[in-house]
Image: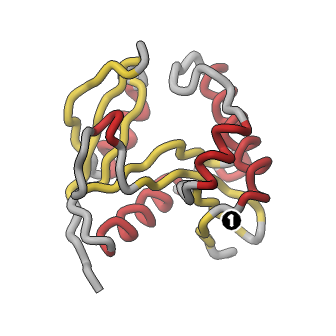
Amino acid sequence: MPSLVIRPAALDDSAAILAVLNDARQRLAFRKIAQWEQPFEISFINSALQRSEFFIATLDQHVAGVFRLLWSDPEIWGDTTDSAFVHTLAVHREFIGQGLGYRFLNWCETSAARQGRLYLRLDCASSNAALRNYYMRYGFVPRGEKTFKSFHVALLEKTLRPTLP
């Protein structure tokens, strides 16, 4: 069984990231799930890459998925230094159903705990009950809702056990 490798994404990963995210967006739209309504743009990807936010996961050197891990998220969560924030998590269509989403979250949880963070936080469309339930099965608990740029999001949080080196 090939091992999962998660690494910081590089600028030359932008096309692969864009392809995974826009494919995931199209799959959600086909299922009438309003999560990412607008196509992702390369300028968004490149900007996030310059801030070292994106991570890319590979299985046997094939892109299996992508996500962003942020150390602050003032627009959605306010000013806080006790949390890490997961955004833009997507699994490549060829790897769906293999539990990779939870493995990505586990990697984020471990990384955040090593940085002394108390919480792992994320948000998703309030109307996306399936995704909210997915996160709650992983241990996230609801922490309210927020309207963000005319888009309603559910806020979810998981308590961590910091493991400072």
Q: Residue at x 27, y 51 (%)?
A: 139
Give x and y (percent) for residue 104: 49, 59
Q: Residue at x 66, y 39 (%)?
A: 21
**Residue 74, relative to residue 34: is it above or below?**
below
Give x and y (percent) for residue 49: 63, 54
Front in this rendered view, residue 162 or 77: 77
Residue 126 appears left or right of 55: left
Residue 128 appears left or right of 159: right
- Under tag 1, what secondary structure? strand
**Residue 164, relative to residue 152: is it above or below?**
below
Front in this rendered view, residue 163 or 11: 11
Q: Residue at x 62, y 48 (%)?
A: 91
In what quadrant of the picture does the N terminus appear?
Answer: bottom right
Crowd rating for badge 1 (residues with CA inside 10 Å; few <14, some 14–19, many 20+) = some
Quarter location, residue 131: top left
Q: Looking at the image, which residue sits at the far bottom? A: 165
**Residue 60, relative to residue 79: is it above or below?**
below
In what quadrant of the picture does the C terminus appear?
Answer: bottom left
Given the image, on which type of amino acid does mark 1 rest?
Thr
**Residue 88, relative to residue 115: is it above or below?**
above
Give x and y (percent) for residue 112: 34, 65
Label 1 sits on residue: 58
Quarter location, residue 84: bottom left
How many marks the image carries: the answer is 1
